[in-house]
Amino acid sequence: MQAATDVMTAEHSFPRQEQLVEERLVLWYFVAALTFMTVSMLAGILMGLQLLRHNPLPPIEVLSPGRWRMIHTNAIAYGFLANAFLGIMHWVVPRLTLRPVFSRPLSYLIFFAWQFVVLATAVGLMFGQAQGLEWGETPVWIDPVAQLGLLLVAINFGTPILQTRGPMYVTLWYYLAALVWTFLTYAMGNFVPEYFVCGSSAGAVGGLFIHDLVGLFVTPLGWGMMYYFVPILLKRPIWSHGLSLVGFWGLAFFYPLQGIHHFLYTPIPMFLQYGAVLSTIALELVVVTVIINFIGTLYGTGGACLTNLPLRYFYTGILFYFLTCLQCALQVTMTFQALIHFTDWVVGHAHMVMFGVFSLWQLGVMTYLIPRILKTEWYNPAWCEWHYWASAGGLLVMAGDLILGGLFQGWSWAALHPWETSIHLSIPFWSVRIVAGLVMFAAQLLFIVHFYLTWRKSLQTAPAVVPAAGLATA
């Protein structure tokens, strides 16, 4: 009798699922994310054409390739990745905490404010208001607004997480840490070099900002997302809770120390450069424990990745993550860095981690969640397969092409060939990159059209029961 009373009390203590999650806002974030991804990829294609001496834009200053290049990077980081993560957090955090976000009106305010930040950044970059810091080009007048927005995000999601009673699931560990780290990282990168330090000190802080933006913003949100969705799709717990803790604390300890490996062979003191090299290699060992944990979770499932498309996105991203980290352990050594410094190897590496890992994970989550939110099946499941293969295959070709091209560029420079020689030998690689980029761009356009048609279908049909796997068949 007491047990039944406890169950009834619990049912009345916590809101129902439909009261926890603002599903409409999740969709809005996905729409915004895909919109900015389209803009970013279009800017990337324009830059790629410029390298092949085919700039389709008129010779107007605000349309110059250098400015579109900054739009390409900022739109993917703050427009696509940030929007998608915010949408996913609105789905995950209420379910794990059994509490809604701190304030739904605040959630909508953050949504519109963040779109303003991203759009204003793009306009400011086009009109020459960029700061002289890689990944921190956001115009000075935008920085306080963005910083305030990150604080509001931390309050909105941090409140239900901190109210959780008992042990927290590892996803909430990563999310809570990301809320704090992202706020501090953005402040460090956009205010300290601008107002407080200069010279090699500013370079050191800039290096920390560049890498911490990936490691303390994107990575914890990405891994936290994976720790939530993979067990749900596999219907089994994570293989080792102990390894999940090793991954979390290893990330927290080693990642902030390695940003200066972006500036090897610079006037920054060598002890800082060597420290960054050692911490980078140490972090790769930590990452391997996380990968082992997810492989162990998959073991014995009978090839679930072959039949479950969202799961295939996740484990494809894990494969690219392993390759990326293996690259890191090589390219931060002083000997190898001397060969690939300033080459397209670095560009290929960046695309492999930002698109091949985190973007594929987010696209997998969208593939899983969109039919659930719309209460209907995908308009054409075969198109989801086309989207996956064109995205993953195009990225594999692009990253492999740029990595190989970077080696040839490095060998050309090491042989003291004239600069023009490295340009001529790069043209075939840049041509392949354009083709691969167009395939990836077409895949995202297909996904957007498919999203729209599925939404139209949801308006015309009664809500359907979506299979537990999200998209269970190939």
Image (spheres, rainbow, N blue to C red):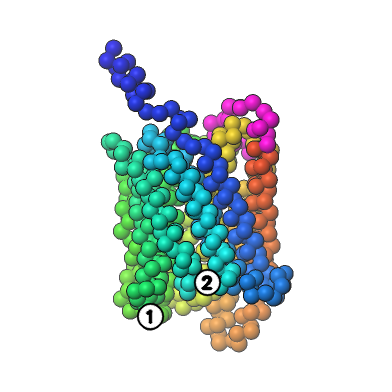
Q: Residues within 10 Å of mark 2 (few under 14, many from 20)?
A: some
Q: Position of residue 249 (x, y in %)?
A: 31, 53
| Depth check, front residue: 77 or 443 | 77
- Give the side of residue 275 with respect to residue 386, left or right: left
Residue annotated with mark 2:
129
Start-end of magenta stretch: 456-474
Q: Quadrant of the N terminus?
A: top left
In which quarter of the view is residue 459 placed?
top right
CA distance for labels 2 and 1: 21 Å
What residue do we see at 47% from left, 74% from top? 132
Report helix, strand or loop for mark 2. loop
In which quarter of the view is residue 170 placed?
top left
Q: Is residue 464 magenta?
A: yes
What residue do we see at 32% from left, 70% from top? 275
Compare marks 2 and 1 and give the one earlier in the sequence: 2
Q: Is residue 270 above or below residue 358?
A: below
In the rendered structure, find residue 199 and report the number of the disc placed on it: 1
Q: Quadrant of the C terminus?
A: top right
Amino acid type shown at disc 2? Gln
